[in-house]
Amino acid sequence: MAGTMLAALVAKLTLHSRGEPSSEEVDLVSIFDGIHLMSEADPFYGGKVMSVFGGILLDLRKAQPSPTGVHLDVIVIWGGLSVVVPPGWVVRNEADVFAGGYEDRAQPSADPDSPVVRITGKVIMGGLQVTTKSPVEAVT
């Protein structure tokens, strides 16, 4: 465990997030802290998301998906990731979850032309949630 904490600390000092509300692609890194990003990108392609001992809230309700959909490649270790999508978007979780959890509260549509969010990567002793209502709104 001490080695993992040391590696996370080194990663925190060397890895940096890249992503603004208008970014078409993001590279979000949360190590021992939190990130809240509401995307307004048109189009939004996706990107990489890493949460280690931290949390990320990625809100896509104002984003316009790219014509090929949205792809998020995630690494969540002892942390959490919440992805908020508009009602009707289809979420395909292909991430491997080990000793953690995945919860899908999205309201998908049966429309074959609905935007698709594809999630790949690893969730290890952490949590991944997809919803149509921001967890921040749920407590306010």
Image (cartoon, rainbow, N blue to C red):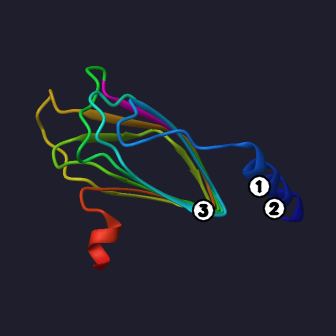
Q: Amino acid at mark 2?
A: Met
88 or 62, which is in the foreground? Answer: 62
**Residue drawn at point x = 16 percent, y = 44 percent:** 88
Q: Amino acid at mark 3?
A: Gly
Residue 62, compared with residue 6, is above or below; it is above
Which residues are the magenta region?
69-73
The quadrant where residue 89 appears: top left
Q: x, y (%) of residue 93?
A: 41, 42
- Is residue 81 shown left or right of residue 22? right
CA gap between label 1 and label 3 equals: 10 Å
CA gap between label 1 and label 2 equals: 5 Å
Q: Mark 3 or mark 2: which comes first in sequence? A: 2
Tag 3–tag 2 contact (CB < 8 Å): no
Pointer 2 residue: 5
**Residue drawn at point x = 35 percent, y = 36 percent:** 22
- In the rendering, which numbered label is found on residue 8? 1
Secondary structure predominantly adopted by residues drawn in magenta: strand
**Residue drawn at point x = 27 percent, y = 79 percent:** 140
Residue 90, compared with residue 31, is above or below; it is above
Tag 1–tag 3 contact (CB < 8 Å): no
- Is residue 35 shown left or right of residue 134? right
Mark 1: few, some, or many residues within 10 Å (few <14, many ≥20)?
some
SS under mark 3? loop
Q: Amino acid at mark 1?
A: Ala
